[in-house]
Image (cartoon, rainbow, N blue to C red):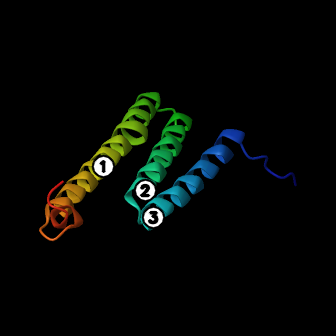
């Protein structure tokens, strides 16, 4: 009886699936939106590699563009806009230090 030698491509694909599951779990458990965008970008990269291993290069390229670049960028820009809006609103509230100093 001889032991079956695993195909390196199948082994690499299995490792990539496990890595994708781990990164997806990390993305779901991360609470800070900025860090979550970074982890989401890593997940997109891992999924692009997995699609490439599964011989779907067109899907891999789409995943690389959308999942690794565009979506995290949109999340980061949205978080930035929300934080700026919150800063403006807190600065314009009556009773802030700026108002007490005479509006300078």
Query: How far across and how far down the image is residue 38, in percent?
Result: 46, 49
First of labels 2, 3 by sequence position: 3
**Label of residue 21 in the image:** none
Residue drawn at x 52%, y 34% is: 52
Q: Are marks 2 and 1 in contact (CB under 8 Å)?
A: no
Determine whether 23 is above or below 96 in the image.
above
Q: Most extreme residue toward the front, as rendered?
A: 102
Q: What is the distance, in whole Å, between disc 2 and disc 3 at their CAs?
A: 6 Å
- What is the count of numbered marks? 3
Residue drawn at x 50%, y 62% is: 26
Q: Which residue is mark 2?
A: 36
Q: What is the distance, in whole Å, between disc 1 and disc 3 at their CAs?
A: 18 Å
Nearest the camera: 103 or 8? 103
**Label of residue 80 in the image:** 1
Q: Most extreme residue toward the bottom, as rendered?
A: 95
Nearest the camera: 51 or 68? 68
Query: How far across and how far down the image is residue 71, in percent?
Result: 34, 43
Query: How far across and how far down the image is residue 85, in percent?
Result: 20, 54
Residue drawn at x 86%, y 51% is: 2
Q: Which residue is mark 3?
A: 30
Q: In the figure, residue 82 lies in which quadrant?
A: bottom left
Q: What is the distance, in whole Å, between disc 2 and disc 1 at their CAs?
A: 14 Å
Q: In the figure, residue 93 lies in which quadrant?
A: bottom left
First of labels 2, 1 by sequence position: 2
Q: Are marks 2 and 3 in contact (CB under 8 Å)?
A: yes
Circle 3 sits in a helix, a strand or a loop, which is it? loop
- Image quadrant occupied by the N terminus: bottom right
Query: How far across and how far down the image is residue 77, in percent?
Result: 30, 44
């Amino acid at each position: 009886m001889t032991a079956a030698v695993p195909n390196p491509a199948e082994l690499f694909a299995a490792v990539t699936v496990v890595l994708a599951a781990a990164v997806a779990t990390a993305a779901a458990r991360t609470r800070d939106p900025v860090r979550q965008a970074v982890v989401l970008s890593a997940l997109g990269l891992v999924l692009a590699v997995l699609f490439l291993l599964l011989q779907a290069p067109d899907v891999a390229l789409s995943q690389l563009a959308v999942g690794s670049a565009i979506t995290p960028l949109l999340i980061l820009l949205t978080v930035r806009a929300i934080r700026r809006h919150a800063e403006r609103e807190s600065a314009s509230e009556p009773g802030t230090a700026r108002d007490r100093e005479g509006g300078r």
